[in-house]
Image (spheres, helix red, strand yellow):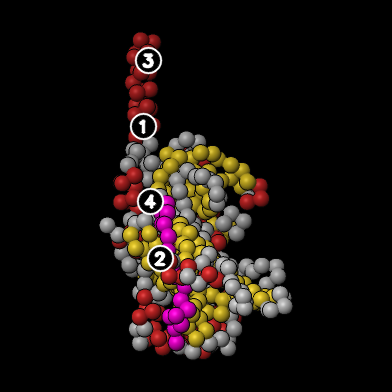
Amino acid sequence: MLRFVTKLLPAIFLVAALAAAQSIPPQKSITAIAKAANGAVVSIVMSGKNGNPIAQGSGFIVSKDGLIVTNYHVIAEGTSAVVKLPDGAFYLVDGVLAFDKARDIAVIKAHGEKFRTLALGDSDRVQVGQEVVAIGNPLSLESTVSNGIVSSIRSIDEKGGKYLQITAPISPGSSGGPLFNMEGQVVGVTTMYIKGGENLNFAIPINDAKPLLETHSAKLQNFPNEPEPTPANAPPSTTGEVLASQVNSPAYRYYQELLKNEDSIISGSTYACFEDDPQSKTFMVIWASIMNKRTMNVITYTNTNGVSDEDGALDFEGQLMPSIDGSLFATLHTTIAYKIDLGHDTDTFEWGPDKLTMKTGFGKVTPPLLPTTLEFNMQRSTGRYIENVIVYSPDGSATTANIRGKCIRIPDTRTPEEQYLFLK
């Protein structure tokens, strides 16, 4: 009997080992993970009260009836949303199932059924050094895939818990996307990166989102519709009021008319920028183009009373610096033709994934001409901008004006990031 038991024990251990091996999903290639995720990673576009887009982020579908996990900050502002699939299909969002603001997680529901879904893994089993894959929509560049490793698992008290520190690159617009282990399971929600830090990116463990998916609300909630953050010295306003004032302004009506008539300057530009002043008759367009994979060109036109000031256009050109995640950076300088005007010989335009900055009029001005300097800063995620204008008087005094407004994407035009993808 003892001999029989002794012979049986190795067999038992062998069966147990085989069962354990079978319970661990096989490793997949990055290509296989990306292919399996196609159709389940979505772009989320938030809109304000008037229907204009105000923010964009990523999310991923976890149920066939349209439950989508994303970051809270993606859906925090605005009153409605649509989700866009890589095949171009759009679905309205019915509402918010649940959210945890402290952990920056939200679950929303798209209107539809029979969606493709992603499998969730166990983030408690994630280990430092293991390989991971991130998929998202940075700067609306859909289904961008990046890979890296888990470089640390950190507890950040002020952020409410643990974070997976990863080397997989992420950018604005990637927020809310899935982070996969090499078995193809979602183990995190990409949420933030540190500017200026090389490969310092973070994801929220997926186990933090699972309790929200177990919420069975009687009815869906509305979007939080938080007010747009403004500087401490800025006048109080809400995104809705700002957009309403722009839409009702003469400048916006001129823009719509020119767009309808396919004006070459308007229809070829990337952004149209409108002041918050409801009486404004002036707006600016930003025409941005990739000349080749090394050179970028930006021209700005001011339009007043429906007429573009082509003679007063500002022309910038310079070297393009693409990054591996699809972001574009460029510091553009005044072209040769504009260097003749010493008042504009040092003008610059900086293009980046987070903001656009233009500085003009800082060159040498010969008396009796008086210098007028302008600094324009636009936040790309919201389109909000502030323009600081300083006008100098003969007596040496200066008058400063702070103009606030919002830039919108001109329909049917490609951003430089999108243009870059189509270059051979």
Q: What element carries label 2?
A: strand
Q: What residue type is labelled 2?
A: Asn
For the stretch drawn in magenta, what is the main secondary structure? Answer: strand
| Dots 1, 2 in contact, CB < 8 A | no
Q: Find out whether residue 129 is within the magenta segment.
A: no
Q: What element carries label 1?
A: helix
Q: Which residue position holds label 3?
A: 5
Q: Answer above or below: position of 398 versus 144.
A: below
Q: Quadrant of the N terminus?
A: top left
Q: Answer above or below: position of 222 versus 243.
A: above
Disc sitting over residue 297 in the figure: 2
Tell me which label, 3 or 2, sits earlier in the chain. 3
Q: Is residue 66 left or right of residue 406?
A: left
Q: Quadrant of the C terminus?
A: bottom left
Which residue appears at 51% of the width and 89% of the height? 250
Q: Which residue position holds label 4?
A: 145
Label 1, label 2: how many angstroms apart (C-alpha)?
57 Å
Q: In this view, does 103 lie to the left or right of 136?
A: right
Name the front one of labels 3 and 4: 4
Residue span colored magenta: 307-323
Name the front one of labels 2 and 4: 2
The image position of residue 385, as x and y in percent, is: 56, 71
Name the front one of labels 4 and 1: 4
The image position of residue 55, as x and y in percent, is: 50, 67
- Kindly indicate the quadrant of the structure image that contains residue 277: bottom right
Q: Can the viewer see residue 117 in this picture?
A: no
Tell me which label, 1 or 2, sits earlier in the chain. 1
Label 3, label 4: how many angstroms apart (C-alpha)?
53 Å
Q: In this view, does 255 lie to the left or right of 26?
A: right
